Each structure stands twice: as structure tokens, then as C-alpha cells.
């Protein structure tokens, strides 16, 4: 009997439109001979099922069900394609855990931890996983520009602590530009992380659970036409993504080992995509995304393709792992 799969997309953050694209790709490639797929839009205003004619029906938040032509539909598994809150920060994960509905992303604690860049990097530090020097600011704090300069230097990156797709991020070259960069980051989150600039090769490493085992996918090298891998570079063709990355064997081994170690230490499940910058042969972690982009052009699907895994197989495997 075919399983009912809810593909949740949308969300509450600036990544809403990107999530819709990911969710629609999952819907397109999910094998309809094996699964009954339902697109579910999650937004601040409504939770609705969307049919192929774009008609909407309300989702019951009581048990995450929907009534279609007088038939009550419940779901065997949720495919989580929401980037940002509430799909990547643990809120939806906790909801589905309470309802005992399997879902494809990691558990709620791991989602909340990885979505918080400051807490993630602090949690991984005891395991020898290196990161850039950083300075923290919360909304309402007085920004001590001198202390920031002494701790991280210039240029530096000012980032929203809990945001994705490079929303709220700025590269700052001079002290006078800090206030505007800080204001920009606070538009996305009430917490900020300011990091020292690492000058090296940037790579992205996908890690998944594949047929019951942790699998590191082929590594992607990021080359951007812009000053850094910002929104334009990610989504508007201002970058080159080279898979497999043009790095040395020792660099490949080092970053693969660390990405896998982080995945297993944190007890992650489903998809993850970790970002690193090399200083010589040593990878420094920037962040981990537990609900990465899933369009045909997105990095993790590119990596899966290089590993010989089609989108249909990638998505089916994620559901099968969740159903275990």
C-alpha cells in the first residue's frame, strides 16, 4: 500500500520562496508509483494542502490531517523542505515528534542547535572542529567597535546568528561600516555573530544517511564572482560550483572526516550540508544546514548526482530512512 507523504514547504522566514522551489522539486521527482505525495504550504497566515490546480484546503493542526472530498487524509511521513523557521530550527520537528509522525530531517534538538551558528560552533569545538574567531552581539547590546576590531580584525563578516541563504550577512572592511552591517543583520535575527575573515578555498560538504549508513557526498568548491558567497552568488548565477572540488587528497580527507564526525557527533539524520574554508590543509567550519536547498541546481542534489544518486532515489531514500 502506498504511503501518504506530506511535503512541507514555505515557512516564516526570508527563505520562503526558496523553500517553495525545493518543495515543488521534491513533489516533481518523488515516485508517484510508490508514494501519494501532498504539497503542504506552511506560512504565518495559514497551513494548507495545495492540489495540482492550486486549490487550497486547510490542514488541521490538531493531528496534521486534511479532508479531501470527504475523506480524511493522515500522513505516514513528512518530507521537510522548509528552509529557516519553523522547519529548520526545531519547531516543526518537535511538533511532529509529539504527533509521532516520522519526518525526513533531524530531531528537534539537533535542528535548534545547528540553526544557531554560535551554539553549533561552540558545541563542536571540544571535538577539535575549528572555526573562525568570533564576537557575539545581542539586540540591545552596545557594540564595542574597538573590542570587535581587537577580537576579529578587518575585514570581518557580520552575520545573523539564525538565518540562512546569506540573508543578513555583510563583509566589513573598515570600522566605520560596522553600524550599517550590524543593523542589516538585526533585521533577520536578534542575535549576531561577527567572524574573522578566513582567506582560503571555500567548500560545501553534503552528508546523508544512505541505506542506513553515513555517506559523505562528493565535495563542492565554491567560487563566487561577488565578494563572498552571498544571496546573488547562491541563487542568481554569480558563482561557480565545481563538483568534485579541486582540492588536494589530504584536504579532501580532512574535510570529509570532519563533516562526517560533526554529523555523527551531533546525531544528525537526513540531509546536511556543511560549509568550510581551508587555511592550508585545515578546514574551518562556517555552519551546518540541515534542510539544504533541493532544487535541480542546488548544491546537495549536484553532489548526489556525482555520486550516482538521482533526485528520485535521494528523496525516496530520505523517506525510507525516516520510516525506519
Image: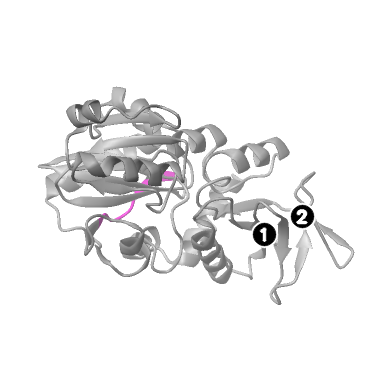
Q: Is residue 7 above or below residue 12?
A: below
Return the residue nearer the eye: 270 or 203.
203
Residue 147 quadrant: top left
The answer to whether 126 appears left or right of 68 in the picture is left
Where residue 222 appears, x then y in whole percent? 24, 58
Residue at image x 71%, y 70%? 51
The answer to whether 300 appears left or right of 20 in the picture is left
N-terminal-most mark, 1 or 2: 1
Residue at image x 36%, y 65%? 305
Q: Which residues are magenta?
A: 213-220
Residue 41 falls inside the magenta stretch = no
Residue indicated by mark 2? 59
Return the residue nearer the eye: 249 or 298.
298
Residue indicated by mark 1? 40
The Cα–Cα distance between marks 1 and 2, rounded to whole angstroms, is 8 Å
Residue 256 quadrant: top left
- Quadrant position of the C terminus in the picture: top right
Q: Residue furthest right?
A: 70
> Do the residues under discs 1 and 2 have CB atoms within 8 angstroms?
yes
Q: At numbered mark 2, what does the secondary structure look like: helix, strand or loop? A: loop
Amino acid at each position: 500500500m502506498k504511503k501518504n507523504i506530506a511535503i512541507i514547504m514555505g515557512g516564516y522566514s526570508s527563505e520562503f520562496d526558496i523553500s517553495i522551489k525545493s518543495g515543488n522539486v521534491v513533489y516533481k521527482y518523488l515516485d508517484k508509483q510508490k508514494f501519494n505525495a501532498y504539497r503542504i504550504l506552511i506560512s504565518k497566515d495559514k497551513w494548507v494542502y495545495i492540489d495540482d490546480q492550486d486549490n487550497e484546503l486547510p490542514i488541521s493542526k490538531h493531528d496534521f490531517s486534511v479532508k479531501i472530498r470527504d475523506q480524511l487524509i493522515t500522513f505516514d511521513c513528512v518530507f521537510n523542505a522548509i528552509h529557516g523557521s519553523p522547519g529548520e530550527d526545531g519547531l516543526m520537528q518537535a511538533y511532529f515528534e509529539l504527533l509521532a509522525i516520522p519526518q525526513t530531517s533531524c530531531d528537534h534538538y539537533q535542528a535548534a542547535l545547528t540553526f544557531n551558528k554560535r551554539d553549533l560552533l561552540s558545541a563542536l569545538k571540544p571535538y577539535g572542529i575549528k572555526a573562525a574567531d568570533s564576537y557575539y552581539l545581542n539586540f540591545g547590546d552596545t557594540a564595542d567597535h574597538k573590542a570587535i576590531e581587537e577580537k576579529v580584525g578587518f575585514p570581518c563578516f557580520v552575520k545573523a546568528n539564525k538565518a540562512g541563504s546569506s540573508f543578513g550577512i555583510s563583509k566589513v572592511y573598515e570600522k566605520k561600516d560596522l553600524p550599517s552591517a550590524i543593523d542589516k543583520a538585526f533585521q533577520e535575527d536578534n542575535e549576531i555573530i561577527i567572524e574573522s575573515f578566513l582567506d582560503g578555498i571555500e567548500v560545501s560538504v553534503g552528508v546523508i544517511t544512505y541505506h542506513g549508513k553515513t555517506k559523505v557526498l562528493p565535495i563542492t568548491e565554491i567560487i563566487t564572482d561577488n565578494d563572498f558567497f552571498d544571496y546573488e552568488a547562491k541563487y542568481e548565477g554569480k558563482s561557480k560550483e565545481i563538483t568534485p572540488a579541486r582540492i588536494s587528497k589530504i584536504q579532501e580527507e580532512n574535510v570529509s572526516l570532519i563533516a562526517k564526525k560533526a554529523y555523527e557527533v551531533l546525531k544528525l539524520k537526513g540531509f546536511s550540508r556543511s560549509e568550510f574554508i581551508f587555511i592550508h590543509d585545515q578546514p574551518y567550519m562556517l555552519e551546518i544546514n540541515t534542510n539544504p536547498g533541493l532544487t535541480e541546481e542546488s548544491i546537495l542534489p549536484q553532489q548526489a548526482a556525482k555520486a550516482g544518486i538521482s533526485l528520485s532515489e535521494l528523496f525516496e531514500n530520505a523517506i525510507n530512512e525516516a520510516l525506519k
